[in-house]
């Protein structure tokens, strides 16, 4: 049985959130919405997942544990795996805990985690991982601004925010037909100038980012043609609508102030709980139907296979196996 002392507690800093944001804002429209979350919730989930992975990589580096990232791909493609250690692929499963009472209980005593865990069944049944590859479970204790009042409080108290707007229509995303949207034109109905980051793709589907300064009610064009518009980012909440026009589509999108999402995750601490090979998870796991209650969530959105954290293997054991090359001799 896994002991609470075997759960790794890793520090959190804002660079973890920033790394997650850089990936999330480009990849949102290329990730499968398995849990049927809102755009804002999906973005923050991606941010949390990247943050946990980066924290784990920092721990591996600090402890001299070798790994590779050869499974990583471009933002438009699904990663083949998160990490590879000792020749085995690692699928890192992360959970964002944003309930204040649960965060307090966890930070007071990591034993709170011992009866929490879940893995999406559709991924479990896929062939992305072999039976000797493994799952690793991480939990991020952090807050979100889910409601407009939460965002107002964050702004009023000077906390970090990252405001994003993402189109959902296929013709803006280049999903219906891959063609130029033209040089995008932006205009802000505001009293003060505002900086806008425009993110999308070039003709070769490469990431394309431009940063524009919009004077009040003054039209500004991007320097290059965009073939997709993935997101717009502003550093503060605009005092009026921001418009973006595509000459090729003959269409203008108007973004009202309430339509900007804050995807900043206010992380406090990361907990790396444990790991199991896929074969071990198959043997120990029990089926959890959609809608079932688990400790970290009031209800699951999809069918899962679940193993309690207390039945996982400790991370320190994983590090020892990799460093001593014990897997390679099996």
Image (tube, rainbow, N blue to C red):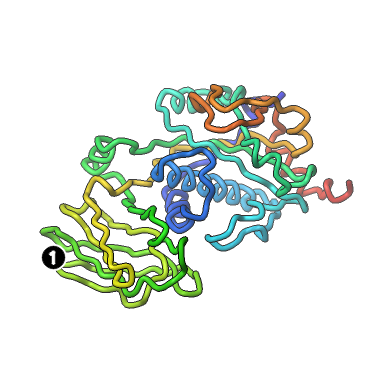
* Residue 11 shown left or right of residue 288 in the figure: left
Quadrant for the N terminus, please: top right
Residue located 75% across and 27% down the image: 284
Q: Residue furthest right?
A: 329
The quarter holding residue 173 reads bottom left
Numbered disc 1: secondary structure: loop
Across and down, in percent, residue 179 comes to 43, 72
The quarter holding residue 307 reads top right
Label 1 packing within 10 angstroms: few (<14), some (14-19), many (20+): some
Residue located 27% across and 47% down the image: 259
Across and down, in percent, residue 46 comes to 49, 47
Number of residue marks? 1
Q: Residue furthest left?
A: 191
Residue located 31% across and 51% down the image: 163
Across and down, in percent, residue 160 comes to 32, 47
Q: Is the residue 201 above or below the residue 7 in the image? A: below
* Residue 110 shown left or right of residue 218 in the figure: right
Across and down, in percent, residue 222 comes to 30, 73
Q: Is the residue 160 above or below the residue 181 in the image? A: above
281 or 55: which is nearer to us?
281
170 or 241: which is nearer to us?
170
* Residue 227 shown left or right of residue 162 in the figure: right
Residue located 57% across and 33% down the image: 302
Q: Is the residue 183 above or below the residue 54 in the image? A: below
313 or 178: which is nearer to us?
178
Return the residue at label 1: 217
């Amino acid at each position: 049985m896994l002991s609470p002392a075997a759960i790794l507690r890793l520090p959190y800093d804002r660079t973890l959130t920033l790394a997650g944001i850089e990936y999330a804002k480009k990849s949102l429209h290329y990730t499968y919405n398995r849990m049927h979350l809102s755009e804002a919730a999906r973005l923050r989930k991606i941010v949390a997942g990247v943050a946990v992975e980066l924290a784990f990589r920092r721990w591996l580096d600090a402890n001299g544990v070798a790994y590779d990232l050869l499974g990583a791909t471009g933002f438009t493609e699904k990663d083949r795996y998160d990490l590879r250690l000792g020749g085995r692929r690692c699928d890192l499963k992360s959970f964002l805990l944003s309930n204040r009472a649960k965060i307090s209980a966890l930070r007071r005593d990591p034993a709170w985690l011992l009866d929490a865990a879940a893995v999406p069944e559709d991924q479990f049944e896929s062939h992305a991982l072999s039976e000797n590859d493994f799952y690793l479970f991480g939990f991020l204790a952090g807050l979100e601004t889910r409601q407009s009042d939460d965002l107002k409080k964050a702004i009023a108290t000077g906390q970090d925010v990252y405001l994003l707007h993402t189109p959902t229509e296929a013709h803006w995303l280049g999903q219906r037909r891959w063609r130029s949207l033209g040089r995008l034109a932006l205009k802000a109905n505001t009293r003060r100038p505002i900086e806008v980051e425009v993110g999308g793709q070039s003709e070769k589907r490469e990431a394309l980012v431009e940063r524009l300064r919009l004077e009040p009610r003054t039209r500004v064009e991007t320097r290059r043609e965009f073939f997709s518009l993935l997101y717009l980012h502003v550093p503060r909440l605009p005092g009026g609508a921001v418009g973006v026009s595509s000459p090729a589509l003959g269409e203008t999108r108007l973004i009202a102030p309430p339509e900007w999402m804050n995807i900043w995750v206010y992380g406090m601490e990361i907990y790396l709980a444990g790991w199991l090979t896929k074969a071990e998870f198959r043997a120990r796991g029990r089926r959890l139907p959609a809608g079932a209650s688990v400790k970290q969530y009031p209800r699951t959105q999809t069918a899962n296979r679940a193993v309690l954290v207390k039945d996982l293997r400790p991370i320190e054991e994983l590090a020892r196996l990799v460093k001593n090359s014990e897997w390679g001799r099996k």
